[in-house]
Amino acid sequence: MTGTRLYPQRRYNGLLECFFRMAATGVVPSRFFRAPLPDKDHRTKVTGTPSLEIVSHCWRYAHMLIYQLSSIVLYPPTQSDVVVTVFYTDEDIETKRLLDFIGSHEVGRVRWNWQPLPREQLFRRGIGRNRAALNTRADWIWMTDCDVVFHAGCLDSLADQLRERNDVLLYPRQEHRTTLLADTSALLARARSMLRQDEPLSLLEIDRSEFSPHPLHRAKGEYQIIQGDVARAIGYCDRIPPHQAPARHWCKCREDRVFRWLAGTHGTPIDVPGVYQIRHAEKGRYRKHPVWAGIRGRIRRLQSGIRGG
């Protein structure tokens, strides 16, 4: 059971997406568009060692994914069993090379799970997330993005928080993040240079002085830690057609708001130190359109300034 469906009526997807964005405000009952949520009394509480699946997507973002995967090798879990799932496409040569490199590392309590997808399915993030949610065997599944880094103490602190809980949805109370970085920044340029050359790859460490703390107020796109029984029951926007439709290009990621509506919660905050996010002005999905990429970068910097960083 993969949860992946094909919706050939692509011209209707935009209208459907608008409908579900409106529905997610609460004007439509979510129970019409998902399987029943497991009752709290029937959701598992882990008393011993929790298991966790971390799910990322990568399309031309290997220069950020290298920091995420390096952090798991450098700061591996000791209090939980972790599956690291990355959805990618084989035609993304840099990402494929990175995954081959990371996969050569044997890390205690960690299992690498590389999942190739056709490009049209990779471009709709909800497809991979839904597949992972429906098929996970973990007690919890963390839907994240490849620009998030799990630094020292992160995974072990998370394991402590996950014991004896069965909330539908959790998220870190705080993250540390950079300003919007240009591709020429030292952090990104260093990774790009290594990935584009034939030299051997190595693990990369972030400079934590480039990050500053910021509170989180809901379980947004890269910070959704879903209880395993819930994930297996309702998937990830499993019955929402526009978020399960293959696409010709990378789609704007708006499905997290719809998922919160389906789950009936904005999430419960938990204390998890060591969560870092690399923020970037130039989006990899716009790389084939340099003029638009430049415009998008300037817009993102302006928005960041208005929002206070």
Image (cartoon, rainbow, N blue to C red):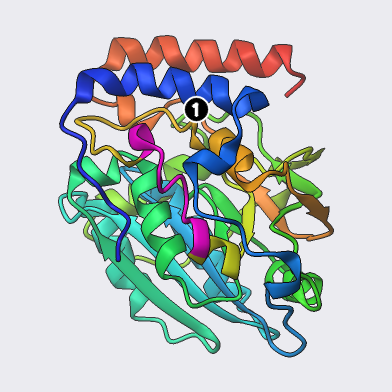
In this rendering, is residue 265 above or below 137? Answer: above
Q: Which residues are magenta?
A: 233-243
Q: Nearer the viewer, residue 203 or 53?
A: 53
Q: Nearer the viewer, residue 257 or 177?
A: 257
Is residue 241 part of the magenta span, yes or no? yes
Quadrant for the N terminus, please: bottom left
At label 1, which amino acid type do we have?
A: Ala
Quadrant in which residue 216 is drawn: top right
Is residue 38 part of the magenta span, yes or no? no
* Total marks in image: 1
Q: Position of residue 204 (x, y in %)?
A: 51, 61
Q: Nearer the viewer, residue 157 or 282?
A: 157
**Residue drawn at (46%, 56%), measured in percent from left and top?**
235
Q: Is residue 52 left or right of residue 99?
A: right
Quadrant in which residue 65 is drawn: bottom left
Would residue 204 be seen by someone viewing this image from the given angle? no
Q: Which residue is mark 1?
A: 182
Q: Position of residue 19 (x, y in %)?
A: 46, 20
Secondary structure under the numbered disc 1 in the rendered image: loop
**Residue drawn at (57%, 43%), measured in percent from left and top?**
31
